[in-house]
Image (cartoon, rainbow, N blue to C red):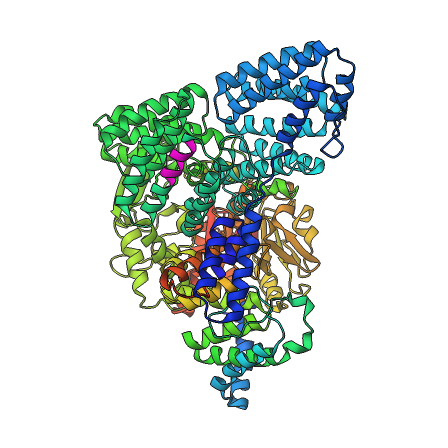
């Protein structure tokens, strides 16, 4: 006779994904948030800071602020950005479309979560170009602003030589697609 | 703006300045524009002051001082060469000071010639200078002696490695000249590198890097980074290679001759090889701003040709190669001209531009030169190129000879095939000598010879250089002492009811050999390698999440990889399957026959890394036969954030009932999987496994008292093991070729390992384990037991491929026990 063991999983990843999905659904149901407005708010929140936390430049129309390293900025000033990021992340997890993905990635970057932003943009690039590896996704993508933002995100990993070269490949591809863009 | 910033951080200051300028011109916001303009000014300023390297400054001031006999401060930290020389100068007569100044000028001329690769002039100058300075008892004689030996080594004179080591020992003993000592480490590294002893060379270069940094010679640090980039690249360690190449780009010095260009060229070839075309193209601006000889300009034109080709501009590419050939005529030195011609030729050969007739003539000349000069790192690629040209010219016998020679050289060096061509040509489209030999043999219907070439190719595998870097042991490196097995040996080793199947991926086809005791046949299925890898990746992806029921990828993969030959294999025969490293993720048991029957139900399967392993694992297994004692380990309560695994406890308790006297440990600790495992023939591990994609030696099995990294595995612990079952997530997933957790155990001579292709859920892992061990104890073979256990899960959950197709066997497929009665 076939004996079934208890139904817990050996793979942490799957369990974690389930927990996140549940939390996300609860949050969205409870919130009913105006996410488009949140995104505009994100730009305003970023512009309200006296400095920018990333040296690279995002493609959205952020006002100029001098660059300062993250550790020099009081944590509480990031609070509005983190709130906006949380909402946009939930929106991405529900919709899973390119627009919400872009906005969520941008928000992560502004909220000083470069690693999360890179992971999300990598997924978007690979999905967009239908290429299984990042470099060929960069070389075939036609989305200049996504490429440019990806480059800005990768520049947040200065100690990683590969990230630096990938950032350059992405920025150069963005520049080839839109030679008049100052962001790329 | 981001482009400018990236270029600036990498150290491509010319490109960065141009990009900042463009950004400031195009920008409409006054603040962003002003920021870009300011950055442009900063970058432009930092381009200007390229510094003279200390060696140049040292020699200039020495020559001046020698003429007038004045004192000389030491410019390098802790190195006393300058002050000792000054002290000795003060004791010399005016006549001797003039002799010394003259000897130094001769030496400087020799250095100049050496930097330009004019070796005859360089060696003769350093020899003359060494004689004069030795007779004057000047400490500078040591410097010149080092240069003389280095010159001899570059010309591949025998015994020069011993001479450089002897000088190094002398200098280390003196403790006064650490800078010279660092130079000898560098020279030793160069010599080893030229001899193809990549790993030893890396160690010498690392010593040189540390020693140059300690005395403050940044110019030499830059040079050493560049050669370390090449060395790591040749060893297949791409990330480390990139790091060193970028470090070399950032350090800007006015080197002699084309030295700076050569650094940039090497970095560019590396970037091109890894498809970083934009980065390589921007590096051209940097190269154009460095001083150049005619040879340097010719090489620059060739690289422009390569980049134009990679960007799809064939006409421009041809134009650049023509220009490169014209510039070659301006190179005065014959040896240098021939070497540059060879590099241009290799670059052009990589693009496939140019007629085969002209190529054969050129390649003949340059190959002959490579053979004579013992710059044998280039030789395998040259021989392959010449073989291709011979084939095109209708001379298959000579082509075969060249391919075989190239294969032998590659085998003796343990280089990774695709990476070895990195330093030899910039095109990713190049095939290895092995690939060409296989295609040639298949054309000639020499099926067994083609298989033999494929097998030899597989034995040339990546080695984990970083294992040395972290002072760890390389658990993926098995002994290569075993003599290569002939196809005849493999046929003889096949037992009744066994068939060996080897798959090999060429650029445009997949070849499958079917080996039975009575014969060898081959099937060639045309398909682009990238396309096939894509199909397999998609199949793996859907199989691991149960989405493959009617998936077209399953149908495509079955058509491409199974249906052409499966009818040659009797139903029920055990398949020894050799998958190409690129297709390791393939769940072979899922593939279906023409009638839609999964291979799982038709044939038991075991996998091997190469067919020679078929002989080795059977012989090891036979030597350990007799015992079926079993150890069952469950690490159900890992520390940290990992989930507890109560089912693992259930799994090992149930599965252990199949063996008399089996030991069960439900709170397994690291040590139990080490010395504690020694007496057992069957070892089962149920727990988390963490695969480290970047550094597979840091993949780990998770025990209740912490992680057991792969590099910490104790090979002695498995000296009696016949079967290890790794019932955790991804235990067969190899983030780099043949570097899965299962591979680590197989490399330590464990005859068979059961592994997983993807993450498995607890329930099916436990079901599989219980059914598998029951079958083993009933006297079924290991391959049949995997088949039977997987089939039972498939019956229960037919749509859950993630559960039934996850488990595979590697290595010896035979039974562990003879009958159940005997065990009980």
Q: How far across and how far down the image is residue B532, in percent?
A: 33, 53
In the rendered image, the vertical position of residue A142 relative to residue B525, given as above or below = below
Is residue B483 shown to the viewer in this render?
no
What residue is at 27 percent from the left and 48 percent from the top?
B565
User: Does B74 appear above or below A66?
Assistant: above
* In the image, residue B290 above or below residue A105: above
Locate residue A50: give its quadrant. bottom right
Q: Residue farthest to the front?
A: B68
Residue B299 is a magenta residue: yes
Res. B645 image quadrant: bottom right
Front one among B597 and B139? B139
Q: Residue furthest left?
A: B394
Q: Position of residue B782 (x, y in %)?
A: 47, 50
Query: On the picture, is B414 further left or further right than B699?
Result: left
Q: Does the magenta-highlighted stretch encompass residue A123?
A: no
Q: Position of residue B799 (x, y in %)?
A: 38, 69
Position above or below: B376 against B780: above
Q: Which residues are magenta?
A: B295-303
Numbered marks: total = 0
Tell me where residue B235 appears, x and y as whole percent: 51, 38
Q: Is residue B477 visible?
A: yes
Taken as a whole, is the magenta stretch helix, strand or loop?
Answer: helix
| Residue at 37% in and 29% down | B342
């Amino acid at each position: 006779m076939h004996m079934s063991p208890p139904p817990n999983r050996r793979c942490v990843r799957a369990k974690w994904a389930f927990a996140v999905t549940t939390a996300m659904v609860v949050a969205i149901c409870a919130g009913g948030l105006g996410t488009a407005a949140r995104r505009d708010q994100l730009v305003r929140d970023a512009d309200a800071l006296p400095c920018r936390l990333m040296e690279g430049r995002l493609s959205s129309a952020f006002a100029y602020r001098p660059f300062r390293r993250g550790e020099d900025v009081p944590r509480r000033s990031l609070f509005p950005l983190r709130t906006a990021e949380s909402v946009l992340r939930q929106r991405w997890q529900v919709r899973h479309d390119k627009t919400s993905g872009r906005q969520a990635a941008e928000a992560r970057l502004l909220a000083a979560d470069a690693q999360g932003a890179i992971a999300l943009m990598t997924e978007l690039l690979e999905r967009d170009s239908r290429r299984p590896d990042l470099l060929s996704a960069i070389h075939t993508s036609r989305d200049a602003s996504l490429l440019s933002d990806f480059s800005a995100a990768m520049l947040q990993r200065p100690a990683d030589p590969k990230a630096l070269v990938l950032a350059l490949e992405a920025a150069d591809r963005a520049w080839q697609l839109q030679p008049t863009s100052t962001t790329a | 703006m981001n482009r400018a910033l990236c270029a600036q951080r990498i150290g491509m200051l010319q490109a960065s300045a141009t990009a900042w300028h463009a950004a400031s011109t195009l920008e409409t916001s006054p603040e962003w524009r002003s920021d870009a303009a300011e950055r442009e000014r900063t970058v432009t300023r930092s381009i200007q002051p390229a510094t003279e390297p200390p060696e140049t400054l040292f020699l200039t001031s020495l020559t001046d001082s020698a003429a007038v006999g004045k004192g000389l401060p030491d410019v390098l930290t802790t190195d006393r060469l300058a002050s000792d020389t000054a002290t000795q100068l003060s004791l010399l007569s005016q006549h001797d000071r003039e002799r010394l100044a003259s000897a130094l000028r001769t030496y400087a001329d020799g250095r100049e010639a050496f930097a330009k690769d004019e070796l005859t002039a360089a060696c003769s100058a350093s020899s003359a200078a060494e004689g004069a300075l030795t007779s004057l008892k000047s400490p500078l004689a040591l410097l010149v002696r080092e240069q003389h030996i280095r010159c001899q080594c570059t010309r591949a004179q025998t015994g020069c490695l011993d001479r450089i080591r002897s000088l190094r020992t002398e200098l280390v003993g003196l403790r006064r000249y650490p800078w010279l000592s660092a130079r000898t480490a560098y020279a030793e590294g160069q010599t080893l590198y030229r001899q193809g002893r990549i790993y030893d060379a890396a160690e010498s270069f690392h010593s040189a890097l540390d020693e140059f940094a300690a005395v403050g010679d940044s110019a030499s640090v830059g040079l050493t980074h560049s050669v370390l980039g090449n060395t790591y690249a040749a060893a297949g360690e791409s990330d480390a290679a990139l790091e060193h190449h970028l470090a070399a780009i950032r350090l800007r010095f006015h080197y002699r001759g084309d030295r700076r260009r050569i650094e940039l060229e090497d970095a560019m070839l590396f970037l091109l090889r890894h498809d970083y075309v934009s980065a390589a193209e921007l590096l051209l601006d940097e190269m154009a701003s460095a001083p150049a000889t005619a040879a340097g300009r010719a090489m620059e034109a060739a690289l422009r040709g390569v980049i134009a080709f990679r960007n799809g501009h064939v006409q421009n590419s041809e134009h650049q190669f023509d220009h490169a050939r014209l510039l070659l005529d301006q190179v005065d030195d014959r040896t240098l001209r021939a070497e540059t011609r060879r590099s241009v030729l290799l670059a052009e050969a990589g693009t496939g531009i140019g007629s085969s007739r002209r190529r054969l003539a050129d390649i003949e000349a340059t190959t002959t030169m490579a053979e004579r000069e013992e710059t044998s790192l280039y030789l395998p690629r040259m021989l392959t190129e010449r073989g291709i040209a011979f084939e095109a010219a209708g001379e298959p016998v000579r082509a075969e000879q060249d391919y075989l020679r190239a294969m032998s050289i590659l085998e003796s060096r343990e280089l990774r095939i695709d990476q070895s061509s990195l330093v030899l040509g910039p095109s990713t489209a190049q095939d290895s000598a092995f690939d060409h030999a296989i295609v040639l043999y298949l054309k000639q219907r020499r099926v067994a010879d083609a298989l033999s070439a494929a097998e030899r190719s597989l034995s040339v595998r990546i080695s984990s250089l970083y294992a040395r870097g972290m002072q760890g042991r390389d658990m993926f490196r098995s002994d290569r002492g075993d003599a290569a097995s002939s196809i005849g040996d493999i046929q003889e080793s096949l037992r009744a009811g066994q068939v060996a199947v080897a798959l090999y991926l060429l650029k445009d086809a997949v070849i499958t050999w079917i080996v039975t005791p009575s014969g060898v046949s081959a099937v060639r299925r045309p398909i682009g390698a990238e396309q096939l890898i894509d199909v397999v990746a998609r199949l793996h992806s859907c199989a691991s999440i149960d989405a493959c029921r009617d998936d077209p990828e399953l149908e495509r993969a079955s058509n491409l990889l199974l249906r052409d030959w499966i009818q040659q294999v009797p139903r029920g025969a055990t398949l020894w399957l050799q998958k190409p490293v690129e297709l390791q993720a393939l769940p072979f048991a899922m593939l279906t026959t023409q009638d839609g029957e999964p291979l799982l139900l038709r044939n038991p399967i075991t996998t091997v890394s190469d067919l020679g392993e078929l002989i080795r694992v059977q012989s090891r297994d036979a030597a350990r036969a007799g015992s079926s004692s079993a150890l069952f380990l469950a690490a159900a309560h890992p520390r940290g954030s990992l989930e507890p695994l109560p089912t693992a406890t259930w799994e090992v308790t149930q599965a252990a009932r199949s063996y008399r006297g089996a030991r069960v440990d439900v709170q397994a600790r690291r040590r139990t999987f080490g010395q504690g495992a020694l007496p057992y023939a069957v070892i089962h591990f149920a727990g988390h496994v963490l695969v480290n994609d970047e550094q597979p030696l840091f993949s780990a099995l998770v025990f209740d008292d912490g992680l057991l990294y792969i590099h910490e595995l104790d090979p002695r612990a498995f000296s009696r093991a016949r079967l290890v079952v790794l019932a955790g997530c991804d235990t067969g997933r190899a983030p780099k070729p043949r570097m899965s957790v299962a591979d680590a155990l197989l490399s330590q001579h464990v005859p068979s390992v059961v592994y997983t292709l993807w993450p498995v859920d607890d329930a099916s892992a436990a079901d599989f384990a219980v059914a598998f061990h029951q079958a083993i104890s009933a006297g079924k073979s290991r391959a049949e037991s995997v088949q039977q256990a997987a089939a039972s899960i498939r019956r229960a959950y037919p749509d859950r491929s993630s559960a039934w197709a996850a488990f595979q066997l590697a290595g010896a497929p035979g039974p562990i026990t003879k009958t159940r009665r005997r065990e009980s």
